[in-house]
Amino acid sequence: MASTTAAASELPEGPVMSLLSKKLRALRKKHNRILQMEESLSQGKSLNKEQEEVLRSKSSVLTLIEELEKLRSPLSAAVSDEINAAIQRQNDIISDLLNLLYFGSLFDVKSQSDFTSTMLTRTHERGCCLTYDYVTDDATDLLSEVDLDSISSLGNLLTSRPKYLSLSHKNALQRCVRHAKLWLENSDEAIEPESTIRN
């Protein structure tokens, strides 16, 4: 839970706290105008009707500033709790989805003919993808077999246990969830310690 709290604290000021800060700034600005009016009165200057009306609101302005200042801390805590709850819900959704994909892949037993058909389809799709990218006029780097291999490698890490590691399904799923979170965060961390492929 500490990580989610830290994540929430690193977020920029949200709409709720931004609105509160904006209201406080406006009230303080109004209070400063009132102080200037009081200074003008002390110097024997007169005020127009609008200024007199503003001056009479001094006590209510001070009360509002005090009340909003008192609200800042509990409101900030409430917003942080809401953000943390949303992050936790997102983590739970990711975990539930990857559980389905992981075990769905694990228990998917195909016949040899199905396997061959699947491989032929995937090979065809790779070829179509590379060909389409080659004939488009986009001024970007062309896709290569290495790019598609990288996508496939990351996809496998999200839905299956690494082939050469002896891990329980629980630990393997934790790795899957971690890779999924890094992907969603646009992380530049390598998918494996010795890998050049990034999440």
Image (tube, grey):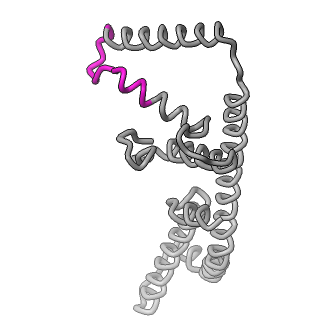
| Residue 56 seen | no
Q: How many marks?
A: 0
Residue at image location 52% in from the left, 68% down from the top: 26
Q: Position of residue 52 (x, y in %)?
A: 55, 77
As drawn, 28 above or below 83: below
Closer to us: 53 or 120 = 120
As drawn, 138 above or below 107: above
Residue at image location 61% in from the left, 61% down from the top: 4
Residue at image location 48% in from the left, 32% down from the top: 153
Question: In the picture, residue 134 is in which quadrant?
Answer: top left
As drawn, 197 above or below 137: below
As drawn, 69 above or below 124: below
Q: Which residues are magenta?
A: 135-150
Question: In the picture, residue 180 is in which quadrant?
Answer: top right
Q: Position of residue 55 (x, y in %)?
A: 56, 79
Quadrant in which the N terminus is drawn: bottom right
Closer to us: 171 or 199 = 171
Quadrant in which the C terminus is drawn: top left
128 lies left or right of 23: left
Closer to us: 191 or 69 = 191
Residue at image location 61% in from the left, 35% down from the top: 159
23 lies left or right of 134: right
32 lies left or right of 130: right
Q: Position of residue 14 (x, y in %)?
A: 56, 58
Q: Position of residue 88 (x, y in %)?
A: 68, 54
Please tell me whether residue 53 belongs to the stretch shown in magenta.
Answer: no
Closer to us: 97 or 70 = 97
| Residue 149 seen | yes
